[in-house]
Image: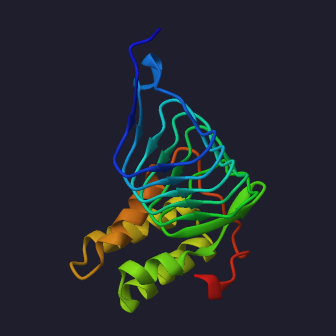
């Protein structure tokens, strides 16, 4: 066999019939799971995935290889996630969805193929003040309703954020996540209700 690892952190709750695959030599050599995660029954985590902390994967959530999930992410039951997808901090994926592209921090996505439908304000309210939540909502509103490409708009927003010392660090992190996306961001311009941002 290959010289590979499956590393599981502390205080994870792993329910019945879950399957976690070790890494592969060609893919980094390690599947790594952080701390304080909940994996409900029949969750599958494929090779070379990196799972952060405090995530919840509901029954039959199925991850392809090389997926990176940050922290405080919720993935609903019966939801497959395509290999190489990245899911940002505080994101939420609805049950019975099918996700094939990257989801930025604090976004909610649903459907087959899953598209962004709004923000996970429930999570945001636990860790942010009202002003930061409003700033992030305004950022996403500008990005998802603008007439330019998402990449061009995000580049402009990042330049503005980096030159302003009063900008919350989460704004910069969100812009960097979008610009680093390799699988693209699943949204349809004009289809996200402003009340959800």
Q: Work out whether 166 lies above or below 186.
A: below
Relative to 96, is 12 on the left or the right? left
Depth order, front residue of 100/54: 54
Residue under the point 71% across and 76% down: 190
Q: Work out whether residue 85 or residue 30 is closer to the camera in this orientation and state it.
A: 30
Name which quarter of the figure residue 43 lies in.
top right
Which of these two is toward me, 158 or 12?
Answer: 12
Q: Residue furthest left?
A: 165
Can you tell which quarter of the image residue 29 is in? top left
Task: Identify whether 124 is placed above or below 86.
Answer: below
Residue 143 locus on image (x, y percent): 54, 72
Q: Tell me where residue 183 appears, x and y as whole percent.
A: 58, 45
- Front residue of 119/23: it is 23
Is residue 139 rendered to the left or right of residue 108? left
Residue 59: x and y in percent read 67, 52
Tell me where residue 93 sits by quadrant: bottom right
Residue that sits furthest to the bottom in the current view: 130
Residue occupying the far front of the picture: 16
Q: Quadrant of the C terminus?
A: bottom right
Q: Position of residue 156 (x, y in %)?
A: 42, 68
Report the number of numbered marks.
Answer: 0
Residue 80 vertical placement versus 55 (above, below):
above
Q: Which residue is located at x 41 percent, y 71 percent?
A: 157
Q: How is the image coloured?
A: rainbow
Specify whether 185 is left or right of 29. right
């Amino acid at each position: 066999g290959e010289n590979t690892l499956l590393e599981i952190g502390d205080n994870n709750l792993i329910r019945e019939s879950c399957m976690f695959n070790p890494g592969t030599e060609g893919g980094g050599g390690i599947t790594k799971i952080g701390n304080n995660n909940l994996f409900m029954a029949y969750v599958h985590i494929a090779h070379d995935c990196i799972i952060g902390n405090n995530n919840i994967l509901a029954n039959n959530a199925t991850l392809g290889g090389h997926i990176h999930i940050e922290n405080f992410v919720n993935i609903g039951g019966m939801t497959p996630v395509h290999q190489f997808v990245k899911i940002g901090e505080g994101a939420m994926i609805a049950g019975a969805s099918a996700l094939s592209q990257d989801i930025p921090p604090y976004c909610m996505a649903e459907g087959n193929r899953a598209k962004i439908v709004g923000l996970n304000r429930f999570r945001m309210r636990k860790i942010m003040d009202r002003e930061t939540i409003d700033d992030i909502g305004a950022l996403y509103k500008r990005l998802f309703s603008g007439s330019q490409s998402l990449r061009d708009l995000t580049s402009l927003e990042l330049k503005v954020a980096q030159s302003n010392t009063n900008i919350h660090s989460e704004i910069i992190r969100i812009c960097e996540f979008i610009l680093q996306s390799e699988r693209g961001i699943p949204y349809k311009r004009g289809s996200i209700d402003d009340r959800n941002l």
